[in-house]
Image (spheres, helix red, strand yellow):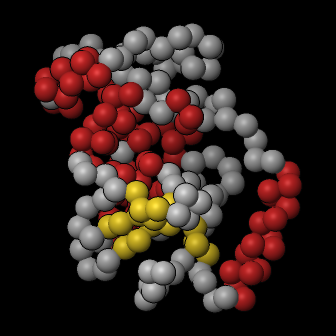
Amino acid sequence: MHKPDYLAAVFESLGPTFRDEAFADYKANRAETPPDLLEQIPWIRKTLDAMRIPVLEYPGFEADDVIGTLVMDLRKTEPIMILSGDKDFNQLHHDGVKQYDPTRKKMIVCEDPDLYLEEHILRGDKGDGVPNVLSSDNCLVIGERQKTLTQKKIDSLIELGLPGKFDHENYRNYMRNSRLIDLRFIPKEYRDK
């Protein structure tokens, strides 16, 4: 349908990533990959190889990091279509970057990627074990309820310009979440690989 000039498949690297080093509770509550899915990976790789589709996987990287790095490096020179339903990629919807969800068979459109990213950082990402900026590091792991973060509070934190407010009580948590969610925080030594 999209007729790309280049196509690559991206796999998750098994083992720890730089995010695990930065935040001990990152994905701490996530279930292990089901064994039946792990058993399918060699077949999937063999099929992709037969189709001459390169498979990209790097130790210490999540698939999102590989995709984010490629998009940020190539978006100025190449049109890019991300095939994934993952809304974390909304932050990349700049400069000719589009996203298609093959499961739902529809385009994912983000009108304001910068606002989406800012709100995502403030809200955290419960699925990845990242609490909102009002909550403690380990609240999700110990089963503690996160502090309530309403849209009104999010709007006021955005208006405040939390990234530049070093003395604000939630700045530390904002930076914690930025390092874990914002793909621009992928360490240079990883991007260079």
Q: Does 89 sit left or right of 44 as displayed?
A: left
Q: Looking at the picture, does residue 96 appear above or below residue 136?
A: below
**Residue 176, can we see it?**
no
Name the residue: 42% across, 11% down.
147
Q: Please name whichever residue, 187 or 131, is drawn nearer the observer in this view of the structure.
A: 131
The x and y percentages for residue 59 are: 61, 60
Picture quadrant of residue 98: bottom left
Is any part of residue 71 visible from this angle?
A: yes
Number of numbered discs visible in the structure rendering: 0
Q: With 122 as the anchor, is 35 left or right in this view? A: right
Q: Where does residue 143 sit, x and y in percent of width and height?
A: 62, 13
Indicate the position of residue 14 as horizontal and vertical percent values. Answer: 69, 54
Residue 108 image position (x, y, % from top left)? 40, 57
Q: Is residue 70 left or right of residue 18?
A: left
Residue at image position (47%, 57%) is: 65
The vertical placement of 97 against 25, above or below, is below
